[in-house]
Amino acid sequence: MPPGRPVLGFIFILIGGIFVLLSSLFFLVAGGFLGFLAPVGVLCGTIILVSAVFVYRRPLQHVAWGTMAIVFGCASVVNLGGFLVGMTLAVIGGAIAVSWQPGGSRGGLPAGPYGVPVAPYRMCMGCGRWIPWAYNICPLCGTAAPVAAWAPREGQPPSVPPPVFAPTPPAVTAPCPTCAAKAEWVPMAAQWYCPAERRYF
C-alpha cells in the first residue's frame, strides 16, 4: 500500500463507480423506464471512476476529487445508484478521500504529551499573533508566554508529562477518643471520622 495516498477512499470510490456503471449498462440493455435514464447513470459512473483514478494519482487534490465522487455518487440515484450499493460506496469513499490528511493524522505534526499533536506555532495571549512554540516571550509585544516544562523543545527529547491526577496522600489516623478503633481525618469536612462508630467528631 503506497504511503501518502488515500488508498481506502480510492478503493471505495472505484468499487462504487463500477457498481454504478454496471447497473446503468444493465438498465440500458434491459430497456424500459430505467433504460431512459441509463445514459445519466453511465455518465455518473464514468465520472466516479475518473474521480477514483485522480484521488489515487493526485493525492494533493484529494478534496476536489473526493467531492466530485460524493456529488456524482448522489446524482447516480436517478438510475438507482448502482442498486444503491454503488452510490453508498462512492459517497463513503469520497468522504474518506476528503477527510484524508497527507502526513497522516493532523497533517503529520509531532506528537506531544498524551499523544496530542503539537503545532510549531502558538498564539500570543498579549497581541494575538502567532509565535514559534519554543519562545518564552513574544518578540512582537513582549508578553511572557512561558512554555510548560513537559513541552517538547528543539534538540531535546520530550520529558514525561505531569500526571493527570495527583496520587492520593495517605490517610491521617489517630486513636478514637471514645472507642479502641482508629479515627481518620477528613479534610473536606475538617473533622475526624470513626469508621467503627460511623460518626464525626
Image (cartoon, grey):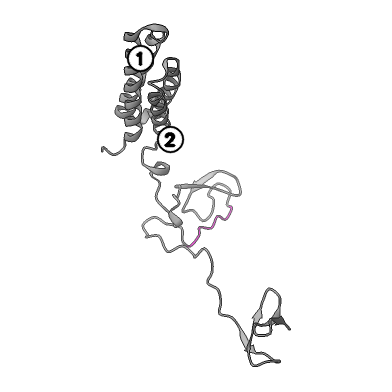
Mark 1 — residue?
Answer: 24
Q: Which quadrant holds residue 47?
A: top left
Q: Which quadrant holds residue 113?
A: bottom left
Quarter holding the C terminus?
A: bottom right
Percent position of residue 48, x then y: 36, 21
Position above or below: 34 against 190: above
* Secondary structure category for the residue under label 2: helix
Position above or below: 149 against 73: below
Q: Amino acid at mark 1?
A: Ser
Percent position of residue 31, x then y: 36, 7
Residue at horizontal 42%, vertical 63%? 159
Disc number placed over residue 99 in the picture, else none:
2
Q: Which quadrant holds residue 29?
A: top left
| 2 vs 1, front mark | 1
Disc number placed over residue 196 in the picture, else none:
none
The answer to whether residue 36 is seen in the rendering is: no
- Local crowd size for mark 1, using a 10 Å CA cut-off: few (<14), some (14–19), many (≥20): many
The answer to whether residue 157 is seen in the rendering is: yes
| Residue segment shown in magenta | 143-149
